[in-house]
Image (cartoon, grey):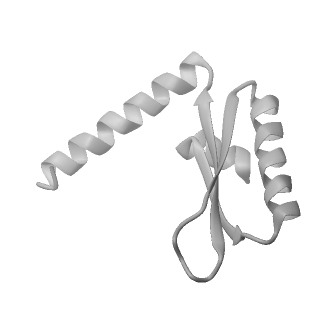
Amino acid sequence: MIKEQFRERRTYEQWMGAADEEGINSLRSLGRRAGRELGWKVRTFVIEPAEPDGSVLVVLAVTESNPLHEQLMTMRAHKALREAWNRGEL
């Protein structure tokens, strides 16, 4: 599931309980492993929002992939911008 999200969006995000340190570390490890399997560089982050429920956002982000994937992501970004422009959202 993480690899599919990396291929589609270059990121994977999941909310977790801040007290679940083992789960957070496990998710970060899975993200790094998925990156290695794809041959891509991945960074992991834990973002602690100012929310009373004590949850954190774990973000796994591709920082570098292969040239073909980079080109695909650039094309998708340009397409999304064109569509937003045509809808008058920009």
Q: In the rendered image of this protein, does residue 58 appear above or below residue 4?
A: below
Foreground residue, 75 or 47? 47
- Residue 69 in the image: state x and y as whole percent: 56, 26
Residue in the image at 69% along x and 27% along y: 41
Q: How many marks?
A: 0
Q: Which quadrant of the rendered structure holds the N terminus? A: bottom right
* Front one among 90 and 32: 32
Q: Quadrant of residue 64?
A: top right
In the rendered image, the vertical position of residue 34 relative to residue 26, given as above or below: above
Question: Relative to residue 10, is residue 77 drawn left or right?
Answer: left
Residue 58's spot in the image, x, y percent? 66, 57
Determine the image quadrant of residue 81: top left
- Front-lying residue, 47 or 7: 47
Across and down, in percent, residue 77 comes to: 36, 37
The residue at the point 15 percent across, 49 percent down is: 90
Placement of 2 over or under 56, stated as above or below:
above
Quadrant in the picture for residue 89: bottom left
Residue that extends furthest to the top in the rendered view of this protein: 67
Q: Is residue 25 above or below residue 57?
A: above
